[in-house]
Image (tube, rainbow, N blue to C red):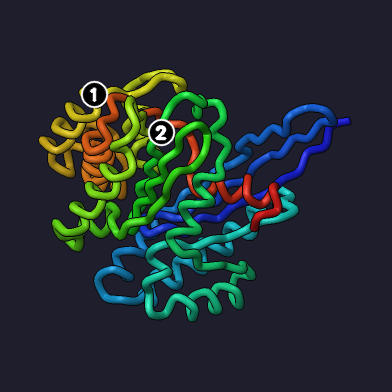
Amino acid sequence: MITIKKYAAIDIGSNAMRLLVANIVEEKGKETHFSKSALVRLPIRLGQDAFTIGDISEENIDRMVDAMSAYKLLMKVHKVERYVALATSAMREATNGNEVIAIIKEKAGIDIQIIDGKTEAAIIASTDLHYLLKTEKTYLYVDVGGGSTEFSLFSDSKMIASKSFKIGTVRLLNQMVNDLVWQEIEKWIKTYTNEFENVTLIGSGGNINKLFKMSGKQQDKALSFSYVSKRYMFLNSLTYEQRVYELGLNTDRADVIVLATKIYLNAMKWSGAKQMFVPKIGLSDGIIKAMYAGKI
């Protein structure tokens, strides 16, 4: 007998917020199958408020209420039986974060939980990567967001170390990341990857997904260090307008994709990784899996 459940995950990030509706297909004696039913991304750049003025502006509070009201209706139409909404870096640092959550609860009927960087990294890492994590290999998982980047090192299918750093595309865009942060990341990566040979990167996040799509490669193929390096130089040589008009990038992607690529490129360089796999996963996928496993 086959049963199908519908779960939803809301990821409230620093650059954008996403609603993922997933089908969970269960059949006795077989592995549970997860598939995307719908994904709605809205470019509400909360980090621009939180990292520069310290709180979420009235305008963006109104936009969030509208977005969450729309998500509530979409979940109703999809007949979602359970959802979890998590907020990350921008809401963590906004002085009025809890106030915003109360407003959204009252006006849109959505319960939101603010999570710390360690929890965020753990949820992302809980995503099922068994098809990538070959037991004899070592992987550095890098998830670049608007306000923070999570690094997790796996070897023999076990997590060796995980850390969240306050570096992300919106922070970099506003020149809020100093050399000390880059040095800390370099030290952390080199410290934990030094004893391993042939480290492979796993990249997640909207920007690296876009970069991978632009490569035209099949999903199970990897991006080489050379490709990422050349692509970084190419994107950096274009103006914001050229990235929008010539490459067809969204306006809220065109200004941050170069900054995100720089983080992945440095992670490859410092870990000695020659390849990077880009599975279509992220925090919202991790939320669905963690909900199903009863972890959240």
User: In the picture provided, is 269 more to the left or to the right than 164?
Assistant: left
Instruction: First in sequence, mark 1 or 2: give its number.
Output: 2
Residue tagged 1: 227
Q: Residue at x 38, y 65 (%)?
A: 90
Q: Residue at x 36, y 33 (%)?
A: 201
Q: x%, y% of residue 265?
A: 23, 36
Q: Can residue 244 be seen in this snapshot? A: no
* Numbered mark located on residue 132 in the image: none
User: In the picture provided, is 287 more to the left or to the right than 282?
Assistant: right
Which sits in the foreground, 193 or 292? 193
- The quadrant where residue 58 appears: bottom left
**Label 1, label 2: how far apart the Cα atoms are:** 19 Å
Vertical arrangement, residue 3 with respect to residue 19, above or below: above
Which sits in the foreground, 213 or 168? 168
Which sits in the foreground, 128 or 53? 128
Which sits in the foreground, 136 or 31? 136
Neighbours of disc 2 within 10 Å: few (<14), some (14-19), many (20+): many
User: In the picture provided, is 136 more to the left or to the right than 262?
Assistant: right
Residue type beneath disc 2: Tyr
Vertical arrangement, residue 38 with respect to residue 49, above or below: above
Residue type beneath disc 1: Tyr
State the quadrant of the C terminus: bottom right
In the structure shown, which secondary structural element does the residue marked by tag 2 occupy? strand
Q: Can residue 52 be seen in this snapshot? A: yes
- The quadrant where residue 237 appears: top left
Residue tagged 2: 139
State the quadrant of the N terminus: top right
Determine the residue located farthest toward the left in the rendered image: 237
Q: x%, y% of residue 30?
A: 78, 27
Q: Residue at x 62, y 58 (%)?
A: 84
